[in-house]
Image (cartoon, rainbow, N blue to C red):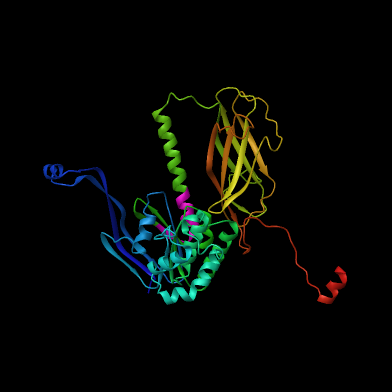
């Protein structure tokens, strides 16, 4: 039996363009205002199995948070059914129901009761709740004296001490300072190991790639893809790049009179050590970028930059001609620039490349032209090592007494 079942779920919001305030207006128009219905979800079918962590991704307005609120029973569907099998806790709005004039202690009991805990359960877990939030010295102070970080920590701690079987998380993985965030992440990982079910909404694709077993891509209220995180994230990012390219082309078509930049990127080719176009490499292979550009007007001090990203996993490495001390000189004609990585010690996965050209080396100056994460290649590696890059290393072993004599 699935922990969460959604069957043909539809949800709409009524957006009022104008509300009629007087009885006369209501009688004349025979309605309370002028509105339109917007469908946040359109026929969603989704099962989340027990023990699975599912990440929901997509643009703002895709329907992710609405789906989460339906699972949390904060909202009801206009059509279809949502069923949950297991004790639920939601990290949707931390501290929802907190009263600023109440003390932290009073708010723990209030918020916990809203989440379904009895007073006896709160009594038993109160010390753990306060200890996890690290608020022992402030628990009897009014909540209005708390910082925003203290407020969020208390809300987070109450929610997780409900001892849920199903946890719903909406963009709150940055609670508190770095040390507390690490504590929260450790708790999530422990909850996963214990067989807990998690559905999370996040724009941090690296977090989804790291924490989730499955990922669901939503757009315009529909479910477009459901699979392992890496292929879903790849499809989503490809769509984002395509939409940006179409928007740029539409903008250029609408404003053909707009001045062209002094230097334009024409084409970027990824080549292997034999000069052949490539999209798959082995770890340690070289890679050459052949960057063709057009010169629309002479420029004395252009700077070209290249950055590599792990798809769904963050920034890997970036450099530019100025940082590397490569003197381009003045450019007054079209040309080709080559950048060669002698060896890529990257672990298996898909990587994205951004290429940009700037008028000079000043960091605050915007790019003349750029292609954001527009080019991709794969590293084929099945060693089972984890991370972004392989660090050269070796292992050795010795008897303890021998090691103590050597160190001493």
In this picture, residue 41 sits left or right of residue 211: left
Rendered position, 261 above or below 103: above
Residue at the image point whose x is 60% and y is 46% from the top: 308
Q: Is residue 341 visible?
A: yes
Using the image as rendered, state which of residue 189 and residue 391 is in the foreground: 189
Question: Where is residue 364 shown, x and y percent of the image?
Answer: 59, 34
Query: Which quarter of the rendering shows the N terminus?
Result: bottom left
Using the image as rendered, state which of residue 359 and residue 270 is in the foreground: 359
In this picture, residue 122 sits left or right of residue 404: left
How many tags in the picture? 0
Q: Is residue 174 visible?
A: no
Using the image as rendered, state which of residue 3 and residue 160 is in the foreground: 160
In this picture, residue 388 sits left or right of residue 91: right
Question: Where is residue 37 shown, x and y percent of the image?
Answer: 25, 49
Rendered position, 292 above or below 279: above
Question: Where is residue 29 shown, x and y percent of the image?
Answer: 13, 43
Does residue 398 belong to the magenta stretch?
A: no
Using the image as rendered, state which of residue 47 and residue 137 is in the foreground: 137
Question: Where is residue 271 shown, x and y percent of the image?
Answer: 61, 44
Q: Quadrant of residue 79?
A: bottom left
Q: Which residues are magenta?
A: 225-237
Instruction: Give the main secondary structure of the magenta stretch.
Output: helix
Query: Which quarter of the rendering shows the C terminus?
Result: bottom right
Q: Quadrant of residue 93?
A: bottom left
Does residue 236 belong to the magenta stretch?
A: yes
């Amino acid at each position: 039996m699935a922990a969460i079942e959604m069957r043909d779920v539809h949800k709409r919001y009524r957006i009022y363009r104008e509300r009629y305030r007087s009885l006369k207006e209501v009688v004349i128009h025979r309605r309370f205002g002028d509105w339109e219905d917007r469908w946040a979800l359109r026929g969603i079918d989704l099962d989340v199995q027990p023990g699975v962590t599912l990440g929901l991704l997509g643009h703002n307005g895709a329907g992710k948070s609405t789906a989460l609120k339906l699972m949390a029973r904060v909202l009801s569907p206009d059509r279809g059914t949502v069923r949950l099998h297991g004790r639920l806790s939601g990290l949707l709005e931390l501290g929802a129901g907190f009263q600023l004039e109440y003390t932290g202690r009073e708010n723990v009991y209030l918020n916990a009761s809203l989440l379904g805990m009895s007073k006896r359960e709160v009594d038993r877990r109160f010390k753990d709740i306060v200890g996890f939030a690290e608020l022992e010295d402030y628990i009897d102070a009014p909540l209005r004296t708390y910082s925003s970080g203290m407020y969020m920590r208390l809300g987070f701690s109450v929610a997780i001490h409900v001892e849920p079987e199903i946890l719903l998380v909406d963009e709150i993985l940055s609670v508190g300072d770095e040390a507390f965030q690490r504590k929260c992440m450790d708790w999530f990982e422990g909850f996963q190991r214990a067989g807990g079910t998690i559905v999370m909404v996040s724009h941090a694709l690296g977090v989804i790639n790291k924490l989730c077993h499955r990922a669901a891509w939503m757009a315009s209220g529909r479910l477009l893809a459901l699979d392992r995180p890496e292929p879903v994230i790849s499809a989503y990012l490809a769509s984002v790049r395509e939409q940006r390219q179409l928007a740029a082309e539409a903008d250029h078509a609408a404003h053909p009179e707009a001045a062209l930049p002094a230097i334009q990127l024409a084409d970027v080719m990824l080549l292997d050590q034999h000069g052949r176009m490539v999209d798959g490499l082995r770890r340690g292979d070289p890679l050459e970028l052949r960057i063709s550009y057009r010169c629309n007007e002479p420029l004395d001090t252009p700077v070209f930059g290249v950055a590599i990203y792990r798809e769904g996993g963050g920034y890997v490495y970036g450099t530019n001609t100025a940082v590397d001390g490569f003197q381009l000189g003045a450019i007054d004609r079209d040309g080709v620039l080559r950048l060669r990585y002698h060896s890529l010690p990257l672990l298996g996965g898909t990587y994205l490349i951004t290429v940009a050209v700037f008028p000079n080396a000043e960091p605050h100056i915007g790019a003349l032209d750029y292609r954001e994460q527009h080019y991709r290649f794969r590293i084929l590696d099945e060693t089972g090592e984890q991370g972004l890059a392989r660090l050269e290393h070796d292992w050795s072993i010795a008897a303890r007494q021998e090691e103590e004599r050597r160190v001493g």
